Amino acid sequence: MEELAGRVAAVTGGGSGIGAALARACADAGMDVAVADIEAAKAEATAADVRARGRRALAAAVDVRRAADVEAFAARTFAELGGCDLVCNNAGVLVLGATHERSLEDWEWVLGVNVWGVIHGVRAFVPRLLAQGRGGHVVNTSSIQGLVPGAANGCYTTAKFAVVGLSESLRLDLAPHGIGVSVLCPGPVKTGILKSERNRPAELGASKLSRADVLAVMAATDAANTTFIEPDRAAQAVLDGVRRNELYVITHPGSRAMVEARVRGILDAYDRTRERSPDLP
């Protein structure tokens, strides 16, 4: 989707961080923007920022864990803005801690937002994109930890790996229809995700994070993945990827060595199997 001007974008998690930056970048590119966030006031603030840039905008309070909320957001986007061309399934939350020590509530919250939120976005928007027949693009926000696992971060890593796989499959499904798919895999970005607990539903309690959990994360993180960038920089990388119809959008090229090490481990396993079982196909 090389030309963005005059088109419509929808962004979840649009009240802050990468989502708000995406909304601003889309407006600067000449797009109208539908902004969804679990915090209604923040969604409206972003929508006001879009309007100040001379574009139309709507704001909606949306809990992406709930299919009905996302469906209503999609319906309103198409009804009030006349369609949609770019869907950014961006809402995300974070729970740190050893994988085997996370509570069921931790898993329910992280997977509910980070995985089911994307699923609900795909199910609500993609059929409408297909029906309007003018192509389009879907961007799903994963993480560098959707490509490389992180210690003491099992809930988040599991969710972000799922988003990468979903995006890769969705791209194959939608390519024949002229709809592109990208997956954003950012390294550290200056967002409020470390404070996402503020929006955790009361019925899911609070996560129990120990000092040992934090130290484990720090010990497993290298210098290439500790440089925080501004959200606007990540948003610009996304729009560049959309224009070029790139599958993977990367923000931190220094993380390449970690990805190469993981892939090498997989390829080495293939080589060992070939040596042990040369008769297998």
Image: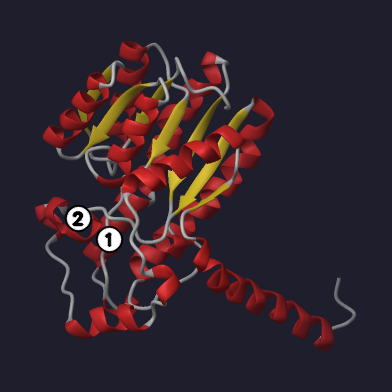
Crowding near pointer 1: few (<14 within 10 Å), some, many (20+)?
Answer: many
Mark 1 or mark 2, which has the lower sequence index?
1
Q: Nearer the viewer, residue 152 or 274?
A: 152
Q: At x 28% / y 41%, what residue is drawn?
A: 13
For the N terminus, which image quadrant? top right
Q: Position of residue 54 (x, y in %)?
A: 29, 16
**Residue bearing the label numbered 2:** 196
Q: Nearer the viewer, residue 93 or 26?
A: 26
Marks 1 & 2, CB-CB < 8 Å contact: yes
What kind of residue is marked 1? Answer: Leu
Q: Position of residue 204 (x, y in %)?
A: 16, 58
- Gap in angstroms between the C-alphas marked 1 and 2: 7 Å
Looking at the picture, does residue 273 appear above or below residue 116? below
Callout 2 secondary element: helix
Q: Position of residue 272 (x, y in %)?
A: 76, 85
Determine the residue located farthest toward the right in the rendered image. 279
Total marks placed: 2
Q: Nearer the viewer, residue 201 or 135?
A: 135
**Residue bearing the label numbered 1:** 94
For the C terminus, which image quadrant? bottom right
Callout 1 secondary element: loop
Location of residue 25 by image quarter? top left
Looking at the picture, does residue 169 appear above or below residue 70? below
What kind of residue is marked 2? Answer: Ser
> Is residue 230 found left or right of 281 in the rendered image?
left
Determine the residue located farthest toward the bottom in the rendered image. 276
Per the rendering, the mark at residue 138 is: none
Location of residue 100 by image quarter? bottom left
Q: Position of residue 232 (x, y in %)?
A: 34, 43
